[in-house]
Image (spheres, rainbow, N blue to C red):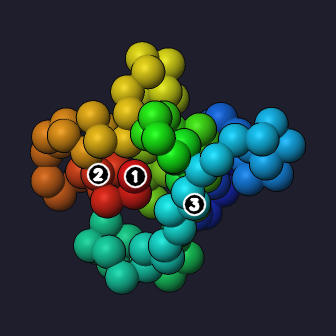
Amino acid sequence: VVFTLPPVARVGLGEAEARRQGLDFDVKFKKTDGWYSSMRVGEAYSAFKVLVENGSGRILGAHLIGPGAEEQINLFAMAMSAGLTANQLKGVTFAYPSYASDLAHMV
């Protein structure tokens, strides 16, 4: 985590690293400046990129910028350490509106 404004965070592999390892994965990327979690604090710069392995659904890496990134990355790290798949993470119900509730839309 880099505690800047907005915060930036990363866990796991980047795209180049995953490609070098020969992994087959999808990249989930979206700008989130229009999401409530960004709009409610007036943040114009926010986005995510999540790498999900095809077949297994394993989360290979998460890259975040924007409000809440410093907390969301902890949840991604925990999910990855516990071996949760993207679909399993989608199934977790987080309080809304919280930064955690955005995770289901990122995987």
> What kind of element bears circle 1?
loop
Q: Report the residue at 26% width, 73% height from top.
A: 36
Tell me if label 1 and label 2 are in contact, CB under 8 Å: yes
* Distance Cα–Cα, label 1 vs label 2: 6 Å
Rendered location of residue 88, percent (x, y)? 27, 34
* Distance Cα–Cα, label 3 vs label 1: 9 Å
Callout 2: 10 Å neighbours few (<14), some, many (20+)? some
Q: In the rendered structure, which amino acid carries the disc numbered 2? A: Ala
Query: In this rendering, would 93 be left or right of 36?
Result: left
Earlier-in-chain disc, 2 versus 3: 3
Callout 3: 10 Å neighbours few (<14), some, many (20+)? some
Label 2 vs label 3, nearer the camera: 3
Q: Which mark is residue 104?
A: 2
Earlier-in-chain disc, 3 versus 1: 3
Q: Which residue is mark 1?
A: 107
Q: In the rendered structure, which amino acid carries the disc numbered 1? A: Val
User: Which of 57/34 is in front?
Assistant: 57
Rendered location of residue 92, percent (x, y)? 19, 37
User: Which of 18/101 is in front?
Assistant: 18
Q: Which mark is residue 52?
A: none
Q: Report the residue at 43% width, 74% height from top.
A: 32
> What kind of element bears circle 3?
strand
Above or below residue 12? Residue 37 is below
Q: Which mark is residue 27?
A: 3
Q: Report the residue at 50% width, 19% height from top.
A: 81
Question: Seen from this angle, which residue lies furthest top?
Answer: 82
Q: In the rendered structure, which amino acid carries the disc numbered 3? A: Val
Q: Classify the position of the N terminus by image quarter.
A: top right
Q: Quadrant of residue 17?
A: top right
Callout 1: 10 Å neighbours few (<14), some, many (20+)? many
